[in-house]
Amino acid sequence: MKKLMTCLLAFIGLTACGQENFENTDVEGFASMMDEPDVVVLDVRTAEEYAEGHLEGATNIDQKQDDFMERAKALLPRNKRIAVYCRSGRRSASASGRLAAEGYRCINLKGGIMAWREAGRAVTTDNYEVDVFKTRGGKTLKFYALVHASIRMVCDDKEIEIDPVTKLGNRTINYAAMPKADYILVTHEHGDHFDKTALGMLTDSHTRLITNQRCADMYGSGEVMANGDSRQIAEGLRVEAVPAYNTTEGHLQFHPKGRDNGYVLTIDGLRIYVAGDTEDIAEMADIKDIDIAFLPCNQPYTMTTEQLVRAARTLKPKVLFPYHYGRTDVSGIQDQLRGDGIDVRIRQLMK
């Protein structure tokens, strides 16, 4: 029986006619795909191996765990190509075959991360997921899911930080290891959004800090934008400050109307809505042509999952990232919006 099981495992990833139902590629081919917006990089090694070093932006799902397919279906979008790797290429071939059998388009890295390192390619120990998009003008825009409500955006050589904080729960963000920010946007003064230490680590003489009046007063500097303000802060980069507030009775004190900001960034024609701490407010109907939306989901401070779904249907973004969700279970949002033409991406944000 053991020998039979070994043979079966060896043939996982093969079709009935003996042909692999996924692609194989070498290091150069794999590297060339990583910045493509329709590719998700998947590391199928153990969490311990992943922590020792992994490819930038890779999602980690251990293919040996019993819930591998369940987690894969929850985290991996079916309309993307899945670029899969492991240590040497054997586990990733197995995982690619299993995923392909479920309808995923998979590309396996021959030789795994060992071949990647031997080719002189870089790995990282930063556990940040990265999503890559192309702007209207063809520039590469990367989103790094750092923690909770902290988002790092990189467009070509420009660094944009949203609500940077150095520590939440058991997660510490080492901003000292990142480039200085060109632009920092802060939505409001709560400690999971406004952190003087993080601002100091990211700021130099060329950094522009944009925030609401309360944070500018508390920090002692910053360009103030109020709800309804719009500003061209660089060529190809426009920022609009939009309302963010609570509407549920008993919660109004958390984010009173008129105090805090959400932001709409237009980067080389691509429109990104970062909602900040808000519920599904009426003003969302006035926010148009959104390509990418970040919507918060944790009561009593922001939205319920039901409110988030309503907000998404109002905004109609092409891509939706639920964020700021703490311990809220957001896994069902993908199914609820499956028929709405919205690509829902759930990232593994800490608290």
Image: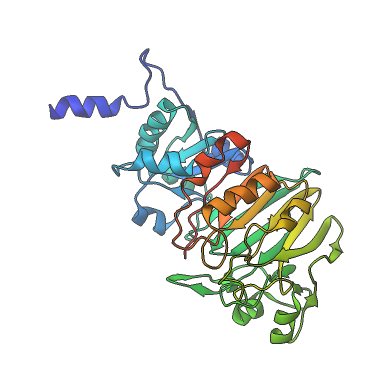
Quadrant position of residue 137: top right
Q: How is the image coloured?
A: rainbow
| Residue 233 to residue 58: above or below | below
Is residue 44 found left or right of 195 in the rendered image?
A: left
Q: Residue at x 63, y 72 (%)?
A: 255
Q: Is residue 122 visible?
A: no
Residue 24 picture location, percent across and down = 48, 29
- Which residue is nearer to you in this view: 258 or 73? 258
Residue furthest top in the image: 17
Residue 242 picture location, percent across and down = 76, 63
Quadrant position of residue 205: bottom right
Q: Residue at x 78, y 53 (%)?
A: 286
Q: Residue at x 80, y 62 (%)?
A: 240
Is residue 138 found left or right of 22 in the rendered image?
A: right
Residue 38 picture location, percent across and down = 61, 37
Give the tally of numbered discs: 0
Q: Residue at x 76, y 46 (%)?
A: 135
Residue 302 picture location, percent across and down = 57, 64
| Residue 48 to residue 338: above or below | below
Quadrant position of residue 159: bottom right
Q: Is residue 159 visible?
A: yes
Residue furthest left in the image: 1
- Which residue is nearer to you in this view: 246 or 272? 246
Which quarter of the figure is the N terminus placed in? top left
